[in-house]
Structure formats: structure tokens, C-alpha cells
Image (cartoon, rainbow, N blue to C red):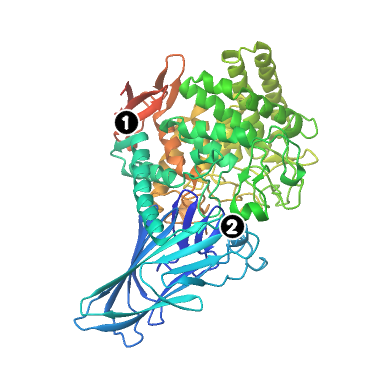
Amino acid sequence: MALTILEGSTFCICDERGDLDGPTHGLYASDTRFLSRFALRVNGEVPLLLSSGKVEYFSAAFYLRNPIAGGLEQDQVAVTRERFVGDGMQELIVLQNLSGHSLTIDVELQTGCDFADIFAVKQYDFALGDPERAAPLPPLVPVEQPVAAELVLADRNGSAATTQLHLSRPAELDGDAVRWQVELAGHGRWEVRVDVVASLEGIRLEPVAARRRFGDELARVRDSLAAWQLRVPSLRGSWGDLEHCFGQSISDLAALRIRGTRDGMARLPAAGMPWFMTVFGRDTIITGLQTLLFGADLARGALEALAELQATEDDPLIDAEPGKIVHEVRRGKAALNWFTAYYGTVDATPLYLILLSETWRWTDDDVLVQSLREPALRALEWIDRWGDRDGDGFVEYERRVPTGLENQSWKDSWDSQRFSDGTLARTPIAPVEVQGYVYDAKLRMAELAREVWRERELAERLEREAAELQERFDQAFWVPERGGYYALALDRDKRPVDSLCSNIGHLLWSGIVPPARVQAVVDALMGDDLWSGWGIRTMSSADVGFNPISYHNGSVWPHDNSLIAAGLARAGRREEALRIVRRMIGVGRQFEYQLPEVFAGFRRAETSFPISYPTAARPQAWAAGTPVLLLQTLLGLEPDRRRQALASRAQGDVPSWAGTLRLSGVRAFDRHWDVEAEGGRVRIEEA
């Protein structure tokens, strides 16, 4: 079983004994693998596991016992490995003689690195890649030993990247392994510390500098976590599952914060472990929307950084058009071998406008809205000029480069756009939820145009376009069968892609559903075909393409459910919204309160607990944001900009199963607010 620890965009994947020796294991930074092999052997054999786990998100401990090898008897030696990642990795290996007589032990540390880019390694992930057809990874580079207490691994394939291993004890190098012959007195102790320094530029540190750096790093990481915890709200209450999930969200979002970049991305959370430890436009925006209870820092950072990355030119090689918001940013070997920025997403641009508006509603920050007027207007122009590829009034996507994403909505796997008979839709494709995002974005930008930019004509035009879109959308996407619902998309021939999918819940969130259609949409969402009992599935079990362990065709995504719950509440369907809140928080208990990116869509009546999805990202940004938005929905919290106050739409309507809750330090309008829920009532006061 893999164990991962991380800090910002540096992370380590290893096995339960602490070894790095699998195809996807490694120490990664800047989308580059800096250590492929790091395996401990005692008398030539693998130590035996006692217990292991994370200490903090950035550290782990592995407790082992000696193998029966080289004359050692059972349980004579305890072996401990303590690991920390920050700007590199540090490991302390300790051997403790548990017997009363002296022992001679051979300790070996096998090392190696291929300096592979993260996309090449990802192909060896069985869930997201294709190991059978994956291109061979680069060969391991030779291990150099400049001095007895230092190893150097240097990339020989197009970069200056190096990995240094500083050893606190001199060692003998034999091929790719270093060895120590340890004489342990009865009940004696021996230890060695390994400082792993990773550099894209080939910068090498002296041992003293490396030790100082790791000492400073550990203090910095701990201080950073403490500062983050002080800035976000605290939750106390009688519903333990919610309290634990909320606390884990705080920790996960702290872990995912990118740092050490010079391009503004240091203010943002990475999308998720392990293959998405970088900025994703869609993920970053949705996480910002989910976590406005924490204050607007993440949202502001996203808005400003994504404005800097907004496309300015038409570049088919990266699916970029002027005004489009970036999909994915890469660095290191991935940038050298693939791209620095890729724009293959059709929804990030309208979502950017929604985040700008929602941030303003929580802060009343006219200065921010004025400063981002030009990026906002460019995004609106992209929607009308580039997003609507054929002038039919809907936003579509079609990749323009063979290596780009075939599907460019949030369900971006290759097989996600299916008709009810299982047939794959062909591009250009107009996704249903994106039309809702565009509708919402235009109404919100109309509000900003009228209230902040003082452009009445623009406001009136956007409101008119939104009304026309709503009418046009209802006619084109509505499917009267099965009680009525909206199609997943329109295909290249403008046929409704008639599978019943969770995307229709996003339409309630955006507000594009006419009042007369709301009941049918709610019935479809909460019916047995979509509602698994654990959450709303991505695809109805009545559709041919349904598979409960597919990525997007029947699985359950927590972030998807959080947006649907918010949409149900917006549509006045609070009972159904709270059903999702209660079940999704309950699911968290099965996953040690760390909601995964996705889990299987088996029916609750058929499984005693929610079933894991293989290799789901954990932690993952918008999964971490899910409990925060669910808590906001439960308490009905929303900003009242006119009164400059935090308000609740849930007065008298907090269910008894939620118990008593106290949320302290909610940030809105540059002030802090305390929220209490008890006996169904919500009380809010300025802190």
C-alpha cells in the first residue's frame, strides 16, 4: 500500500516500509522525479513491518523489525525510519539492539534516479495511465560519490537537474548502494541521517548548508501550518464526523499550498496528490468558491494568478485562444518535455467570472473588481467569440492538437460523453453544465458592470443575453423521457447526448433551470438511478455506459455533490440538500475523514460502506473544499453585501441530527463572525 507525504509541490510516494522501489514511487518536485529508488536493506534483506503512517501531512514514521538473515534471530533489532519533506527530503534511520549481546549488522541503502517527468511516470498508474503501452522510463543515472559522505545523481537527458544525498556517516559505495557495517553493543543504538537536496538548476549544497536548510525548513513548515490554522475558522460541535472532516480539510488545504514559485502560483493550492501537484484552473477556481468561509485569500490569489496566465494569443498547439483561462500549468522536466501551460478546458473561463463575482459579494472589494476588469471583459469576449465555435449560442469544445484532452469539461476522461445507449458523442461538444456557468457568469458580470464599473449598457446587454440563453438552452437540452431531465451535452450534430448525469445538479447551482423544471430535475437527481445512497453518481445506473468504478460514468465525486447540494438549497429544496450533506459527511468516516477525489458508485443497499476508487487523489483540493461548502449549506450562510454582514437562510431549519455547532472566525467584509446553531436556530454575531 502506497504512503504519501507532501509539502507544497514537493511530495514522496513510497511503500508501507518507507522504500521507494515501485514504478510510480519517488521523491518529486517541480513535476520531476528526483529520487526513483531509496530502499533499506538489513543483512541484504527487506526489514519486516511493524507499523507505519503519517505523523503530519509533511512527515511519516516507519517502525520495522529485523529480517531473519545474516545470523540475526527474530526481533533482535528494531529499525525506525523518520521522514520529512519540505524543500527536498530528510530521513533519519535508527537501529536499536534489543538483545543483551553485541551484533554485527550490514546496513544497505539502495539509491537511484531516472529524472522522469511526471507525465511519463503517470502512465504507469493503472487507473489513470496505461502501463502495458507506456513508453519506457529513462534509465537510472550512475551514482557518483565525490566524498565518502555524499552521493550525487545528475540528469543526463536534457536538463541540469541533480539530486544530492548528504550522509551523516561516511559510507562505502557499491554500484547504486551505500553500505555501513554496524557494530551494535547490547541494547546499543546506531543512526544515520540522509539529507536529499533536489535542484532543477544543478545547484549543490555543502553538508553544513544542507543541515541548516532542513532545520530551517522543518521550523518553517510547522510555523506555516500553525499560521494557517489560526487564520481559518474553528469548528466545535456534537456532530463529530463533521468536526473531523472540517479539521482534515484545513490540514489538506494547508498541505496543498504551492510555494517557492515566482509566478504568483505560491498563493494557490495544488489540485491533488500525486499527479496533479500544480495549478489547474478549474480545480483552483472551484476550491476558491467552496472555501469562502475561510476568507477570500485563496479566491483572490486564484483570480490574480489566473489573470496573469490568461491566454493572449490563438495557439492551437496548447488549445489557447485570447481571453481563455488556463487549464494546467507545469514546471521542470514536464515543462521541457510537454508544455508550461495548457488551455484545454471549456469551463474555467466562465467559472473565473463566477469566482470574481462571489469574492466581491463576500468582501465588497470594488478595488479588486476594478483591477480585474480587463481580464473579466476578455473572458466574456472569449465566451462569445471563441467558446461559441459555430455561432449557435452555446459554448463548445474541440481539441486542436492530437496530444490535447479529447474532452474538456470537468468530466475530462476520454469516454465520459456517452449517449444513453453507450455510444460515444463526437466533438464539437457543448456540455450542459457549462451553459449554466455561462448564464450565471453573464448575470453576475451584469451586476458588476452596473454596481462597480458603472457601465449600464454592458449590464443590460449581458442580462438580455443571459435571458436569451436560458430560453434557448431549455429548448435544446431538455429530454422529455424518464420524467424529464437535461441532456449531458449536445454533440457535433446538435443532438442531445441523452444519458442522465449528475451535471444537471450544477444547473440548479447556476440558476439556469426555469421554476417549472426544478421539480423534474430534483426528482432525477434524487431518484434511485442517480442517488446511490452514498451520494449522487456521475451517471445513472439505467444508462448502458454506467459503471460504478469508472472515473466519470457512475462513480461519486464529493466536490460534485457539494455543488449539487448548494444548488438544491438555492432552488429551495433544502431537504434534499441536507440529505447530501449528511450522507457525504458520513462517508468521510470511512476514509479517515479525508474525502477522496472520487469513490465507487455502488448502491448503499449493496455495500456496508463506501467503496474506494483505485488511485483516487488524496488529498485533493476540491475534495478538501467539500466539507467546507457542505457546512455553509447546512447553516445556510451567505453574505449580505448591502448590510455588510454575514446572514443565514436556515433559520429554524437546522436538523436535529446536526446537533449543536459553533463556527468561530468566519471571515466576511474584513471582519470575523461567530456562528452558533442549536435547536434548529442559527445565531450570528460579529466576533
Give the residue drawn at x 76%, y 37%. Answer: 314
Q: Nearer the viewer, residue 37 or 232?
A: 37
Can you say which quadrant of the picture contains the N terminus? Answer: bottom left
Give the residue pinned by disc 2.
118
Q: Position of residue 475 (x, y in %)?
A: 72, 29
Task: Decide if residue 544 is on the left or right side of residue 48.
Answer: right
Give the residue drawn at x 30%, y 36%. Answer: 659
**What amino acid type should be assigned to the residue bearing mark 2?**
Ile
Number of other residues with Cα within 10 Å of mark 2, as a class: few under 14, some 14 to 19, many 20 or more: many
Task: Decide if residue 418 is on the left or right side of residue 639.
Answer: right
Give the residue pinned by disc 1.
664
Q: Position of residue 24 (x, y in %)?
A: 54, 64
Q: Nearer the viewer, mark 1 or mark 2?
A: 2
Q: Nearer the viewer, residue 484 or 613?
A: 613
Q: Position of residue 593 (x, y in %)?
A: 38, 49
- Residue 1 visible (yes or no): no
Q: Label 1, secondary structure: give it.
A: strand
